[in-house]
Image (cartoon, grey):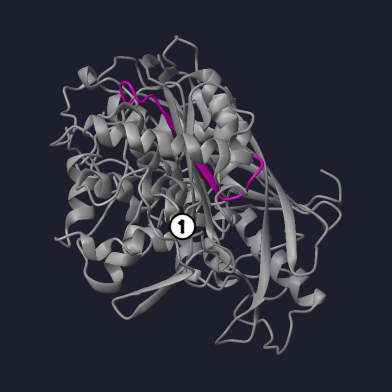
Amino acid sequence: MNGAAKGAIIGGVFLAMVGGAGYGMYSLVGDTGDTGGAKDDKVAGKTAAGASRGEGPVTEKETSEAAKGFLAAWATGDERTAADWTNNASEALSAVAEFKTRAYVSKAVITPGTPNGTTVPFKVEAEVTYEGTTKSLAYESRLTVVRGLSTGKALVDWQASVIHPDLKRGERLRAGTPASPPVKLVDRNDQELTPEKYPSLRPVLAQLREVYGGKAGGKAGTELWIEPAAATATSTSQDGATGQDAGGRRTLLTLVAGEPSTLKTYLDAKVQAAAEQAVAKYPESSVVAVKPSNGHILAIANNRKDGYNAAMTGTRAPGSTMKIVTAAMLLDRGKVAADKPAPCDKTVSWGGRSFHNQANFQLPAGTNFSTSFARSCNTAFIKQIDEVDEDAALSKEATEVFGIGLDWKTGIKSFDGKVPVTTGAESAAEYIGQGQITMNPLNIASITATARSGRFHQPLLVSPELDGRPTATAARTMKASVRGQLVSMMRLTATSGTGAEAMASVGGDKGAKTGSAEVDGSASPDSWFTGFSDDVAAAAMVEGGGHGADAAGPIVASVLRS
């Protein structure tokens, strides 16, 4: 070993400093050399506790010192010192310690990159060893240095992603033999669906593996994986056992391959590919496609920084896409008709609150309900509220006809929508998809599918025969006259209403509904759009995406064209 890389064994780990720029930990046998870098609880001659107190923005020197202190301590396996160089010592302490003891990292080289302000990128080249098998693992991460609120010292802003970029808050790296064997996911035509090709299916595959892996055969191997946060590991799986949330366990490295079982889904690889490509163009977007004739889920896609499966478990106000249910309720009770007038004024008041249309538009006197629907006129809907005798009318329609809130068991964790019973201004808000209503693209796609077919079919990702789980059944079938008028209004929306531009490229028998949902504290509304073409219904949502046709519309159109 030359003078550029001296070190000593510290807890079975070796620190190398290459030209002062690299930190490494190696498994070494019999080396008793002097330390040229960190020693005991010291880092570059200074402990975190002894770091000077500063004020104002973190300086370049402070950034370098804190990053060097943390990375060198991590490299030597000195979790106590590494933790003290962060602003959350308790979380950092266990994460750094478990890098060796629970992730079984037997060797690693940590190489810092060029700092960018107070952010320092670094590369980790590691080896994971478990029960005699060793595999390489390489990745890049970064840390940011901030000033401690109480101490004034420059400290690493602790995030789980410092240890590995795929880690989210509360998650941990683990290696060993998983409880569930690996699962090979295939679509309705037996085409394999891998998370590498279809990234949105990674959390879906994780959940399916957890719920069905033990039932579908196969044999577990050994792996390095991301263990979900404890706060999200207490949800109930489809078979009633404790399962994982939408993030699920995610495999990072396979040390010894298991024997996977094959799990057939109702997904369609072609539609899934189109969905993945469509959401890739819009940050914070999600989309779901289903078959109206049977409720089979054809595609699930998300493009989100947090990796959350908002497509199936999101809880956001759906905006005017909810008018599909409101219109059905009004038609069902004979309060409106597609060809009868439905005044669309600039504003209307209800329950002490004023409601208006987008940009305060209004339509000429005598405009029929079909046109008000196609133009997404809020006031035309709210003006009907006093014509409905019972406050629970909208909630009943949503549950009894559209199956909302009936405890759907799709095959993985999903949220089946919520339309609370409200009064006054809150009732008026719910008529146009605001207020306390919460939905996700899966719910709205199902609502569209029900409108299209006239009958609720609970969305399904995998066959109920796999585990004998019950499926939800709506209390009532939509009246034929209601379905006819509702579908005709959605067709009008897709051809000459607010959805016309987005749906122009979609062929077949098509219909649509746009939506914009105001969110407190957001500069721009959420963009919602739903539509059907023949026997495919799709719905999309883009957080902060603007009006329905702006962002969500093109996503739905892309999926329907597939």
Residue receiving disc 1: 377
- From the viewer's perspective, is residue 444 above or below residue 186? below
Q: Nearer the viewer, residue 199 or 180?
A: 199
Within the magenta stretch, is there residue 6?
no
Residue drawn where x is 49% and y is 26% of the image? 132
Q: Is residue 206 visible?
A: yes
- In depth, the one of 344 and 543 nearer the eye is 344
Q: Is residue 194 above or below residue 232?
A: above
Image quadrant holding the N terminus, namely top right
The answer to whether residue 34 shows anywhere in this view is no
Residue bounds of the magenta highlight: 279-295
User: How many labels sit on residues?
Assistant: 1
Mark 1 residue crowding within 10 angstroms, few (<14) / some (14–19) / many (20+): many
Q: Quadrant of residue 296?
A: top left
Please name the residue shown 31% across and 31% down the image: 459
Callout 1 amino acid: Cys
Residue 554: quarter of image: top right
Q: Residue 181, image x and y in percent? A: 35, 22
The residue nearer to you, when weighing 267 against 509, is 509
* Of residues 16 and 167, the one drawn nearer to the viewer in this rendering: 167
